[in-house]
Image: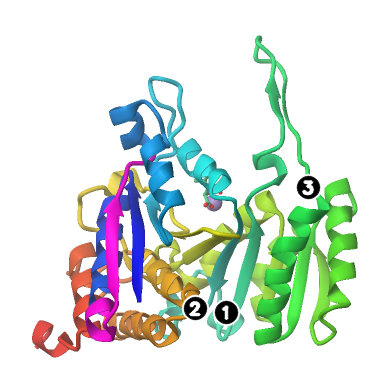
Amino acid sequence: MNLKIAALAGDGIGPEVILQAKKALYAIGVVFDHEFVFEDALIGSIAIEKTGNPLPEQTLNLCLNTDAVLFGAVDDTVSSTKLRPIQGLLNLRQALGLYANIRPVKPYADLLDLSPLKRKIIENTDFIIFREISGGSYFSEKKSNETGTFASDLCEYSEEEIIRISHLAFRTAQKRNKKLTLVDKANILETSRLWRKVVTELAEGYPDVILEFLLADAAAMQIIINPKQFDVILTENLFGDILSDEASVITGAIGLLPSASLGSSSALFEPVHGSFPEGKNKNIANPIASILSAAMLLEHFGLHAESLKVFEAVQKAIELNVVTADLNPYSKFGTNEVGDFIANYILSKDDLYFK
Ligand code: IPM
Ligand code: MN
């Protein structure tokens, strides 16, 4: 298969972790005979610095004309020009029509003790969050007055926006443990009541899937006290943002979590973590979330064996303790060494690397 992939490394540790994801994909290409062509483009702070725009037109055009986007991270700051680097990512999500952000949460057997949660609570947890990312308070009308004494963020959803992501979530639940939990605040919010109505109607088309409803505040608690109960969680933009960071606690480190953002004709793959500016160029960032985002990219294109191979390599790195300091404080390995190990394992060169 030939794939053209836009690589948007962005800020902070973005470039370092994207490099490791590229190495893994390159190795997969060699072993499975695929051609992955990367084209780099600017986004975030670095794009503001160089072009005055967090999402330069050139970057957007590239992303609109590639098969997939591999995304690193963007800074969470306000630049001297008052432009926000994260606006680059938000604009990109919107311009590419990305609406479903998919975040799997599954701890590794070897890392259960990393989590501040008890082993018996998190062991065998395996769920996926389907977070809507094109609507809600992120993108509805925003207002503030000139004196800085009033601000408003509207939260709007249309039936159509709810339907498209819900189908994806139901279909995924059908292939898994057949349970879908819709998380909302239907006791308070009109948008949540709309979500419940639409999702309940759609459920008739998926009779094998059990549909449950959970209020977002209760969900925040249940994710911590009984995460095993979940299979697929479906929720709107802001709740999904908050709950997916919370869920990362189950895996022990946010540096392990990948995500995929899908639209009708575009797909973007990015780690759940941010740009970690303090870690920039120190070779300490965990590249696994970015590498697993590349695995999700492979899966998206139906390259199942290839994606499994990446997971297997990551699993091996964890098993052999070839991990960064966030996973093992005594580790002598950095971002590059972990990335090399994973790429070499894929190339069956692991024995050459660590003898
Ligand atoms: C995420 C991030 C983004 C979000 C920011 C960087 C815009 O926190 O992907 O979870 O809030 O969606
Ligand atoms: Mn977030």
Q: Which residue is mark 3?
A: 157
Q: Is residue 252 above or below residue 314?
A: above
Q: Which residue is mark 1?
A: 122
Label 2 or label 1, whichever lies nearer to me, is 2
350 or 250, nearer to the observer:
350
- The quarter of the displayed image where residue 212 is located: bottom right
- Residue 71 location, x and y as percent? 39, 54
Determine whether label 2 and label 1 are within 8 Å by CB: yes
- Residue 200 location, x and y as percent? 88, 69
Q: Residue at x 25, y 60 (%)?
A: 19
Q: Is residue 22 above or below residue 81?
A: below
Q: Which segment is the magenta one?
A: 28-44
- The quarter of the displayed image where residue 162 is located: bottom right
- Residue 278 location, x and y as percent? 30, 45
> Of the residues under marks 1 and 3, which one precedes in the sequence?
1
Q: Residue at x 84, y 78 (%)?
A: 205
